[in-house]
Amino acid sequence: MKTSELIGPALDWAVAKCEGYTEYCGETEKMLPPRKEYGWVSLFDYNYSTDWNLAGPIIERECIATYASGACSVSPKNPDYWVAEILDTSEILTQYGPTPLIAAMRCYVASRLGDEVEIPSELQP
């Protein structure tokens, strides 16, 4: 799936993967965190694309810039009102989204996993 199209649980899963979560069980909708002694955790407790408390530290750590595009508002003709940019080696990666968090998390995923991400089938829209 294109990183620029990730949204909802698929985007949250991709961010978790970037954060070191190693496994996903579609039947239970749980992930295995980097420190496995904590056990499996629910994907739905990690809403990076909607929770500033989770995404904020990533945005700050990765120095992701977000800003509103030149359009006046979100509309069917312009659903991606927000822009996020991150410096990746010598180039600036840019992603868009309907909210600053979605744009920023897409940008983070693109910087770590690239423009295409293989998403578990249960999470694909």
Image (cartoon, grey):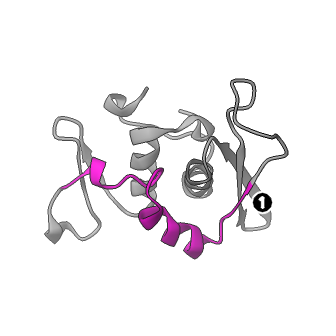
**Magenta-tinted stretch:** 41-67
Query: What residue did someone put label 1 on?
Result: 92
Pick whichever, 74 or 47, lies toward us. Answer: 74
Is residue 22 depicted above or below 2 in this figure? below
Is residue 17 depicted above or below 1 in this figure? below
Where residue 72 appears, x then y in whole percent?
Answer: 80, 40
Is residue 9 depicted above or below 108 in this figure? above
Q: Does the segment drawn in magenta span residue 51? A: yes
Residue in view at x 60 percent, y 47 percent? 99
The amino acid at mark 1 is Ile
| Horizontal relation, residue 82 to residue 8: left or right | right
Residue furthest out toward the front: 72
**Count of numbered circles in the view:** 1
For label 1, the crowd category at 10 Å Cα-Cα, with few meaning under 14, some 14 to 19 and many 20 or more, is few
**Residue 36, picture quadrant:** bottom left
| Horizontal relation, residue 90 to residue 76: left or right | right
Where residue 59 appears, x then y in whole percent?
Answer: 57, 67
Where residue 15 appears, x then y in whole percent?
Answer: 45, 54
Pick whichever, 119 or 100, lies toward us. Answer: 100
